[in-house]
Image (cartoon, grey):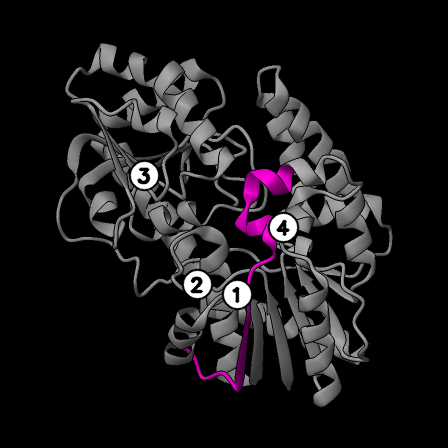
Amino acid sequence: MKVLFALPFPPLPADFGGAIRMFQLLKHVALHHEVSVLSYGNAEDKQRLQEALPLKEIHMLPYAWKHRHRRLGQLYSSFTRHSFFQQSVTNSRYERALNGLLAKQHFDVVHTEFSHLGPFKLHTKALKVLDAHNVEWDNFRRMYEASAWGLKKLHYWAEYKKQRADELKTCLAHDGIVSTSARDLELFSQCLPGLRGAVVPNGVDLEYFRPSPTEPKPLHFVFTGMMAYVPNHDGIGWFLDSIWPRILQKHPKARFSIVGKNPPPHVLARQSENVRVTGTVEDIRPYVEEASIYVVPLRMGGGTRLKIAEAMAMKRPLVTTRIGCEGIGLVHEKTALLEDSPEGFAQACIRLAENTALQKQLAEAAFHMAVEKLGWQAIGQTLLAAYEAWLRA
């Protein structure tokens, strides 16, 4: 099978959720089939990918100006009917490059990553597959609902409305839609009855993220994630404002590590004797290993969180909101503690910190779930099975 992957950014370095998913799916397909890649990026990005994966061809294009100049791009998009999310990565140069590759050689599948890269008119008889990652309009709706009144809230509302129209139109232009959760696929299907879709969940590299033989430090909490991502830094702000003080009141020696690149000023400003903000790190595993509890205090977002799968694979017990663990299948009191209110989340953290037997019980159950269901090899096979079923249809 010959597959062309269209990417909105390079999958390496794979240091946040979207890049990790792209790299792992690309890796699995390339191990079994002939794969070419078109992406935004530079010569260094191309070399990294060439050295990492057995790809037939790699083509890199310079980013669209709206991507390079984000604030100007957002201002520009406010006067158009399309979302900034889409306009930041779509331009005629990318469309010409895609169709140029399709004209030169035969492909069985054109696989597009992220819905905002999907509005191009492709001149091909190949199977067109969209990996949506999230239902982006639902993500913007949640950001709108969780934000205080102001320009940012209005921006989220406008993006929600525009993104919904853009995303549904993109889905209609593809032969098959891949989502990371049954909930996301249902959201698409409610709007587009008869949509052909498959759930290909997010997962974890079980060889890389493994349980540590060293004991964690008591009263150490950790969160990992790309901190420039709005749902992540919103959740951390909520945790620090409404949950962390309740934990410190009961356990003044508690420590919290916030690990991830590009933390915004309001997160950096919260560093203290009890709170560590690392910024970019080469390896998140030591920070997860030293923590006795992994927290996911998210109030918005879409898709499924790779951070959850990584914590499960490393046998770290979880306290999370229900939005934070959507699509994973965690069960309250069996594989994690699930709480949505500040009071409930804080009490769950305190209870877990004071009960090492419960920590081990939850961590062990979640670990076995990760091994059985969340390894990238099994997930990659699910994607290939979807390709084959749709090609036969």
Relative to 221, say whether 116 is above or below. below
The residue tagged 2 is: 375
345 drawn magenta: no
Q: Position of residue 12 (x, y in %)?
A: 41, 64
The residue tagged 1 is: 379
Mark 2 / mark 3, whichever is N-terminal: 3
| Type of amino acid under label 3 | Pro
Q: CA distance from mark 2 to mark 1?
A: 6 Å
Residue, x 63% and y 77% (percent of image)? 4
Q: Are marks 3 and 1 in contact (CB under 8 Å)?
A: no
Q: Disc 3 on helix, strand or loop?
A: loop
Foreground of the two, 315 or 127: 127
The residue tagged 4 is: 88
Q: Is residue 232 left or right of residue 160?
A: left
The residue tagged 3 is: 317
Residue that extends furthest to the bottom in the rendered view of this protein: 105
Q: CA distance from mark 4 to mark 1?
A: 29 Å
Q: Are marks 2 and 1 in contact (CB under 8 Å)?
A: yes
Mark 4, other Cα within 10 Å: few <14 / some 14–19 / many ≥20: many
Quarter of image, res 258? top left
Foreground disc of the pair 4, 3: 4
Q: Position of residue 275 (x, y in %)?
A: 23, 26
Q: Is residue 166 left or right of residue 283?
A: right
Q: Which residues are magenta?
A: 53-74
Q: Position of residue 27 (x, y in %)?
A: 47, 74
Q: Disc 2 on helix, strand or loop?
A: loop
Q: Position of residue 107 (x, y in %)?
A: 70, 84
Q: Are marks 2 and 3 in contact (CB under 8 Å)?
A: no
Q: CA distance from mark 3 to mark 1?
A: 23 Å
